[in-house]
Image (cartoon, rainbow, N blue to C red):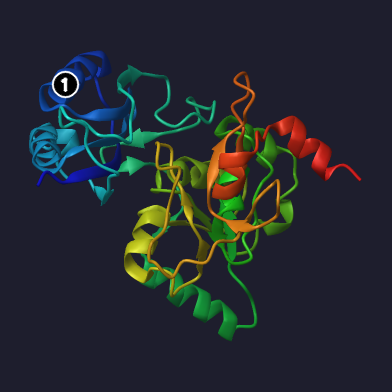
């Protein structure tokens, strides 16, 4: 039986000709029947792809032949399945594009990249090193500040316990949020940035360091790698939002939902698009209400208004 897999990876490295790489990556993925999204820039590559296991393995072998991508760190997860042609059910199409940034903070000129990756970012912490830092701080009578580097809606169904969740609707809002001074009181504290697979924190941690945060870390491999290591037995609570048709994933069957349905307030990790087709907002909606109720941001706003 064919097995469906999804891979997530990124590489920060100077790429002299991202347009040529776009054509190569597009043709390679099409030849293997892979779907998903690849973004390329002069600073690197960011990819999420799904397809049949052997096709994904062939893709990685070919991609690693390019010198800058030789040591790429890949996160794997289970796909929802394959269609009759062997293509991933989790992605509607393949998109391969060149952008100014491979993660859109709106600050391409602030990011410095060399052959070793992002220059001036936070100190990387593996999941065990993160736990060691938390224990060390607690023994000293202090706490580590977890700083969520994702869009605020993602944290509604999963986050690290006690995390600071900036009120941002998209990644481009982080620069203004940092420059507002709202988090200046954290500049002398140990701050651990985290995000889905680690890429947003590569940039976010460097932006924080350049703004005077003196003790910045980044969770290496992101929430995905932490979940692979500790499942639901660590500091992570809830489910992980993902940007494909799965919408969310759990690390173990024991995951306890922390989200609350906007309609009935039931505990859930299920998310769906706003019913207004012109709206891009994601709402937490339980499966029962999703099948029986039309839920939109207008309804959500009315519900929250005293």
User: Residue 40 vs residue 176: left or right?
Assistant: left
User: Residue 80 vs residue 233: left or right?
Assistant: left
Percent coordinates x, y for residue 36 in the rendering: 30, 30
Q: Which of 82 and 96 is in front in this view?
A: 82
The image quarter in which residue 289 lies: top right
Identity of the residue drawn at 33% across and 28% down: 37
* Image quadrant where one finds the C terminus: top right
Percent coordinates x, y for residue 166 in the rendering: 66, 46
Is residue 286 in sight in this rendering? no
Q: Is 114 situated above or below 276?
A: below
Q: Is 302 situated above or below 124?
A: above
* Residue at the far right in the pictured view: 306
Please give the count of numbered marks on the rendered protein: 1
Q: Nearer the viewer, residue 153 or 273?
A: 273
- Secondary structure of the residue carrying numbered label 1: helix
* Residue at the far front in the pictured view: 292
The image quarter in which residue 80 lies: top left
Q: Which of 238 and 202 is in front in this view?
A: 238
Task: Please give the residue where the numbered disc 1 appears in the rendered image.
Answer: 30
User: Residue 215 vs residue 114: left or right?
Assistant: right
Q: Nearer the viewer, residue 4 or 118?
A: 4
Neighbours of disc 1 within 10 Å: few (<14), some (14-19), many (20+): few
Identity of the residue drawn at 24% across and 48% down: 73
Percent coordinates x, y for residue 1 in the rendering: 9, 47
Identity of the residue drawn at 15% across and 19% down: 24
């Amino acid at each position: 039986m064919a097995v469906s897999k999804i891979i997530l990876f990124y590489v920060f490295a100077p790429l002299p000709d991202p347009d040529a790489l776009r054509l190569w990556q597009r043709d390679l993925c099409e030849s293997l029947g892979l779907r998903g999204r690849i973004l390329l820039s002069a600073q690197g590559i960011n990819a999420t792809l799904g397809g049949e296991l052997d096709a994904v393995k062939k893709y990685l072998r070919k991609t690693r032949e390019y010198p800058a991508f030789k040591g790429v760190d890949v996160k794997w997860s289970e796909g929802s399945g394959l269609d009759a042609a062997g293509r991933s059910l989790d992605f509607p199409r393949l998109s391969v594009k060149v952008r100014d940034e491979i993660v859109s903070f709106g600050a391409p000129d602030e990011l410095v990249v060399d052959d070793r990756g992002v220059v001036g970012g936070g100190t990387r912490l593996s999941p065990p090193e993160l736990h060691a830092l938390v224990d060390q701080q607690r023994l000293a009578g202090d706490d580590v500040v977890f700083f969520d580097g994702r869009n605020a809606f993602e944290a509604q169904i999963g986050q690290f316990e006690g995390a600071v969740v900036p009120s941002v609707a998209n990644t481009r809002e982080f620069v203004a949020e940092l420059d507002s001074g709202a988090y200046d009181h954290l500049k002398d504290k140990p701050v651990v940035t985290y995000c889905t697979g680690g890429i947003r924190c590569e940039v976010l941690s460097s932006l924080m360091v350049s703004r005077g945060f003196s003790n910045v870390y980044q969770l290496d491999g992101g929430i995905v790698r932490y979940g692979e290591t500790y499942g639901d037995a660590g500091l992570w609570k809830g489910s992980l939002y993902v940007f494909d048709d799965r919408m969310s994933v759990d690390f173990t069957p024991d995951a306890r939902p922390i989200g609350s349905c906007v309609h009935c307030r039931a505990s859930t990790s299920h998310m769906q698009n706003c019913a207004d087709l012109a709206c891009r907002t994601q709402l937490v909606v339980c499966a029962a209400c999703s099948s029986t109720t039309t839920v939109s941001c207008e309804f959500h706003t009315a519900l929250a208004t005293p």
